[in-house]
Amino acid sequence: MAVNINSVRYCLRQSVVALFRNLWLALVTSGIIAISLAILGGFLLLAVNASQFMRNIESNVEISVFLEDGADPAALQAQLDGHEDVSGYTFVPKDEGLEEFGRTMGDRVMLVGLEGENNPLPDMFRVRAHRAEAVPALAAEIQSYSGVEVTDFGEELVARVGQVTGWLNTLFLIVSGLLALGAIFLIVTTIRLSVLARQDEVGIMKYLGASNWFIRFPFLLEGMVMGWTGTVAAAAALSFVYFRVAYSLQTEALAFFLQPVTDMARILPIFVGLLLMGTLMGGVGSYVSVRKFLRV
């Protein structure tokens, strides 16, 4: 046990010594890792925000439910209250609907004589669904309710939103995979060049009778440290820029349309994943790279 502890202490000491002895090489390696993971992390944050934007559009899709003359709004309200696909609704009496129509047209003179019993508009409900894909079926079901004259939900818009959402999800998945593979390749290649610069050291230790793991372990630790350092730098820079941009957008008029994701429950997994990926790839890169020089 004492020999094992001494070996571990020696490997840790050698890792620290090697990092400081090759400080510039370690910094360059960490910098390349930081850049590659920052690009990947930035794209993942973009994907999260694009997904949130599409969900906001989907949540604003409403079903306009027009009632027949003399229909009881309370009866339909009771049916909507117990429906699992309904996230909310708003009742718009015919008088209020006429007011909205006048504001939309911008000319209230057109409404003269249409108040009260002369109002041609029916009472209506604006119904919102939990999921955009449930809107067509929900509209068809509400259409069959007693007292409902007609429903309208912009069928083409809902179909287009669904298509765009599916297309974006596929695109982000493919691009994220390609960027992840590119980052892994770049990290492993960079670590490999770092080990290549010290192949003579590996050869000498091998000829002196050191075991493969005794040689490999310091390089493994160095790779993990460089990967961790690069990832921390990438995460720090990325989080600073992202939250500054998010704050700027929230204070602008466009915040109503562009609401950046600031929920840490959705953002934190990205940074934790980058940290694990950078540290793991640094260690794996060193492990794979040094293996070639152990075959002497």
Image (cartoon, helix red, strand yellow):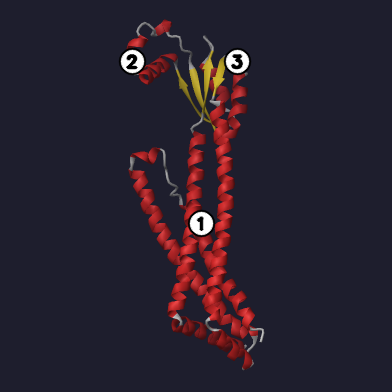
Which residue reaches farthest right? 295
x 52%, y 81%: residue: 197
Comes first in the chain, label 3 or label 1 = 3
For this rendering, which residue is in front, 152 or 75? 152
Which residue is at 58% across, 56% downward? Answer: 177
Above or below residue 84? Residue 42 is: below
Location of residue 284 with respect to 19 vertically, above or below:
above
Q: Amino acid at mark 2?
A: Asp
Q: Secondary structure at mark 2?
A: loop
- For the residues carrying marks 3 and 1, which lies nearer the camera in this image? 1
Disc 3 packing (10 Å; few <14; some 14–19; many ≥20): few
Sooner in the amino-acid sequence: mark 2 or mark 1: 2
Left/right of residue 290 with respect to residue 228 in the rendered view: right
Look at label 3 and name its amino acid: Ser
Q: Residue furthest bottom?
A: 208
The residue labelled by disc 3 is 146
Work out how far the residue at label 3 is from the one at label 1, CA to CA, in angstroms: 49 Å
Q: Amino acid at mark 1?
A: Ile
